[in-house]
Amino acid sequence: MSDQPRRPRKPGKPYRRPQKDPVRILAFEALRAVDERDAYANLVLPPLLRKAREKEGPDTFGARDAALATELVYGTLRWQGTYDAVIAACVDRPLREVDPPVLDVLSLGVHQLLGTRIPTHAAVSASVELARVVLGDGRAKFVNAVLRKVAQDDLEGWIEKVAPPYDDDPEEHLAVVHSHPRWVVSALWDSLGGGRAGIEELLEADNERPEVTLVARPGRSTAEELLREEAAVPGRWSPYAVRLSEGGEPGAVEAVREGRAGVQDEGSQLVALALANAPLDGPDGKWLDGCAGPGGKAALLGALAAERGAFLLASEKLPHRAGLVAKALAGNPAPYQVIAADGTRPPWRAGSFDRVLMDVPCTGLGALRRRPEARWRRRPEDLDGFAPLQRGLLRTALDSVRVGGVVGYATCSPHLAETRAVVDDVLKQRPEAELLDARPLLPGVPDLGDGPDVQLWPHRHGTDAMYLALIRRTG
């Protein structure tokens, strides 16, 4: 037995409580709501930001914190597909076996490493602290190990590792590089046509943060009034559109608070304007918005109808969305009515209206800039569910309009199965209807194709990918 004295043990490091970062905790909570409840980030984020400001105070949680939280949430959602491929290359198990909350923390960390200018050490340490708070110390070690692997390369280097070469598999290459599901890449490419450059421009535009666009409702506000706001610039195409540069807050605009103006993408404005300006044969006193929720197009149509002394009926199937329509139309200077009704079984008489808008439910693939989480929720089989509804609503619209009147079939999707296929199928059965050329009703808007229908694009027009076909009932 050795008579050497034992060395005293070094005292262990005292336990350090994790530091709570309100910005990253908020971003994590938003991602969990999107994952667990199929919530939309644009709906869950504002109340979370308000709650954080109230809890932490404006000095602790200010505008820069809100901007960072917003960037973390939207950036992580937009680039989820690419980040999943990177994370999968850094873990020793299939990604489906990683607990969703752990994957959310990892994705937030990867976005900070690969998609922002946050220094590497700060991105890793902040993510590990978040993991300690929301996951516990054990899983925080896993997060730390994975993020240190990710930090060994930049985004371009990782894409070279995880994306197949374009020449081997063009669609999968674009899906990984631009963070879209493969089937969405394929569908958008079919709708757009052309070669690689065009589809890459479209996918890149889907990943850009969209501008906030306001609409001045005619007779109640003007673009000139809105342009007096700080950070406001004119819209590109609509005479009623005003864009807010980065940092502009719609809620701070008096006309928006009073309902005289609203937030509305310029593509939606163009759809309403084209229908309102389409040539008619005969009277022009009764208009219908047959799928009016949540009310943006109805509010613009109602204001345009008021200028002509026309009546607008706004119909929406879901009562809570009908309530949103009523709120959007409140204060309209001309008569209108909002009802909750199923557009495929309408309560109004056939041939009652001079103008009818049917902005039908769809996959929403035209608004991926605004709702990036939608690209990961939608599946190809969703098209089968929408198809009969879209055709039924278009048939209702044609039944509802009088002879000589005009129907606008619109959808916020460029997918051919939701646009031209629907119109072609219905018109084959309706010889008493004819397509009108919609392009002259969008004056000044370039690159509208061969017509007669119109497809708008984010990368060409700076709008959502709205589709519009104008149809006149001739007999």
Image (spheres, rainbow, N blue to C red):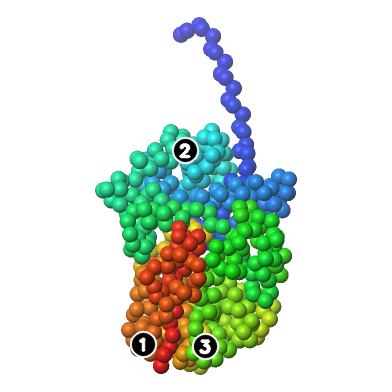
Q: Is label 2 or label 3 in front?
A: 3
- Horizontal and vertical percent position of residue 39: 53, 61
**Of residues 9 and 122, the one drawn nearer to the viewer in this rendering:** 122
Task: Name the residue rendered at 46%, 92% in the picture.
Answer: 403
Label 1 or label 3, whichever comes before in sequence order: 3
Three-letter code, disc 2: Leu
Asked if residue 313 shows in the view, the reply is: yes
Give above or below for 248 relative to 64: below
In the image, is 92 to the left or to the right of 302? left
Q: Quadrant of the C terminus?
A: bottom left
Label 2 or label 3, whichever comes before in sequence order: 2
Find the distance from the CA under tag 1 to the CA under tag 3: 18 Å
In the image, is 269 to the left or to the right of 56? left
Three-letter code, disc 3: Asp
Q: Which residue is mark 1?
A: 430
Confirm or deny contact between disc 1 and disc 3 (CB under 8 A): no
Task: Name the residue rendered at 47%, 79% in the picture.
Answer: 408
Which structural element holds mark 1?
loop
